[in-house]
Image (cartoon, helix red, strand yellow):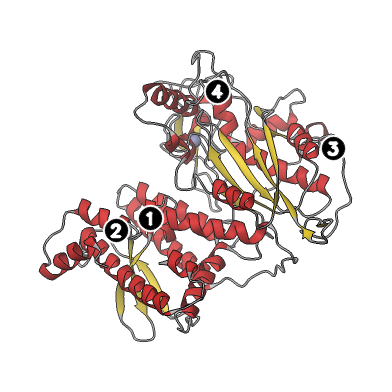
Amino acid sequence: MTNPTDRVLSRAERQAMPVALDVAVEIAKHNGVCIRPVVLRRLDTHTGTTEDVNVPCGATMEAKCPPCAKRNRYLRMAQCREGWHLEAEPSITPDEPNEEQRWLVEFRADTQAQRDAAEQAGDDTTDLDAVLAGLDEEINAAGMRGNLLGRTAAKRNRSTRRRQDAPDLPKRVRQNTTLGRTFTGSDGATYRPSLFVTLTLPSYGKVRAGQGVPVDPDTYDYPRAARDALHFSKLVDRFVQNLRRVAGYDVQYFSSVEPQKRLAPHLHMAVRGTMPRAEIKAIAAATYHQVWWPSVDEVRFEGEHLPVWTERPEHAEPYPDGQDGDYLDPATGELLPTWREALDRLDADEDAEPLHVVRFGPQVDVQGVLSGTPDADQCIRYLSKYLTKSLGDTLDADNPAQRAHTARMTEALRYEPCSPACPNWLRYGVQPKNAKADMAPGRCRGKAHKPEHLGYAGRRVLVSRKWSNKTLSEHKRDRRTWVMEALGLADEVPDPHRYVWKPVPAGDDNIPSLALRLLRMVAERQRWRATLLALEARATGQDLSAVREAA
Ligand SMILES: [Zn+2]
Ligand SMILES: [Zn+2]
């Protein structure tokens, strides 16, 4: 069968004519090829040769292009399916850092060096910062916990009065298992029921059905909606803790955070094992998270009246809080409390209230699901439905009411502190954690403030450690191994020390245009696909649907 894109491609390559980038992008998308590949220079330490390699953006960046996002979605679906109705206890052993982790860590180090050099040279570091943030996320996803900066904040000892008290829920003795109960039906068959749970945030005001826009924007509680979105991931953590306490076993889950039309995040969760519906509802109702941050009730600095940075004297040792300066009140010269001092004051204040308390709304949906049923497949598709979109992407951009709703939500987030390090703390008279020069309220670069994230800056997929017995990169490798076996090729584990990867300096003349790079990647993909299809044609009675999917 002739693919119309083949002709365009071969002609373009043969004549080496400049191809319009938008045409190349369309061809790449049509072929499921990454449209924002990152060029990395790979030194082969065995042969001493270097080669520039196009790495799909999905492998390094957090914001994935549409083809990478789609591939990622299939991978997540496989991961979700594999763990949900597991029949045997997963064996979890702490892994040696694998090849991918090592590669990511080295690549991160190189990127950090590049970023620091750019900063020294006075260049814009926004893009490199985004790559670094994406890499941190990938490294965590690859199975390493914590991040490379070793930020392990000492836990604060809150007074007993303020401790996050256990909700008033039954507590069962914890069995040492991650598997749910099974039931034997009247036909003697074994059933392994699990749960599909949907949790939603409370109402902030009436919204129009189907559109999600407030009926009355003036009374819609945007500040609350903003804070709930900012702290949603903590609420989810609390829910899981409570779930495990009540269930009496080591409950495992695969969940995704998705946007609702009204722009609030909500959570779909596949839970392994089953519990009474009423119990799940009781747990959701009793779950809350208190945000013990300094108060933001009083705006102390705004407009031209902003805190001023002053350097600390030279010091032999680095300052314990990592700051080499402080912000002070421009009128009085008084130093603003550092983040640590502000928290100490909060601890000492018997009457202090949390800045915010976040809870779920009354809408809790619990569905029982049996393994291998169409229902289970439906839920898995549902869980990954929005993975290719950001929170703010779900709106119809042509609808003025929805655009206005997004704008008001973004405005509500503008001065809301998104983290201890958020420059917005200056507005309320507190120095952000690890404060440095040139911070200004309203100019935080944190993901949470951006219209595409709308307050929720956390991971979109949350998977418990003993879900499927594998990390995402192991799932990736599974697919590859499967295809290689089907092709009758050996899938050797490469020597992890063979290659050294480096980012290619910006403006390197040896890099072909993006259009040309995309077409080359398409050509590679088509060769690969042709091989797979030929193989499929030869195979009889063998299920090669996974091969087709991989192609
Ligand atoms: Zn991509
Ligand atoms: Zn911020």
Q: Which mark is residue 223?
A: 4
Q: Which mark is residue 273?
A: none
Label located before the other in sequence (4 or 2)? 2
Q: Residue 169 carries which label?
A: 3
The residue sitting at 23% across, 61% down in the picture is 5
Circle 4 Cα neighbour tier, 10 Å, few/some/many (<14 / 14–19 / ≥20): some
Asked whether the residues under the numbered discs 2 and 1 touch, taking CB atoms below 8 Å apart as contact, a structural biologist would say yes
State the residue position of label 2: 28
**442 over 244 or under it: above or below:** above
Decide if residue 444 is in sight here: no
Amino acid under label 2?
Ala
Q: x and y percent of residue 216 in the render?
A: 50, 13
The answer for how far apart the CA atoms under marks 2 and 3 are is: 53 Å
Would the CB of label 1 be found within 8 Å of ligand 1? yes
Amino acid under label 3?
Leu
The answer for how far apart the CA atoms under marks 1 and 4 are is: 36 Å
Label located before the other in sequence (4 or 3)? 3
Going by the image, does 389 lie left or right of 12?
A: right
The residue sitting at 63% across, 62% down in the picture is 82
Residue 220, by quadrant, is top right
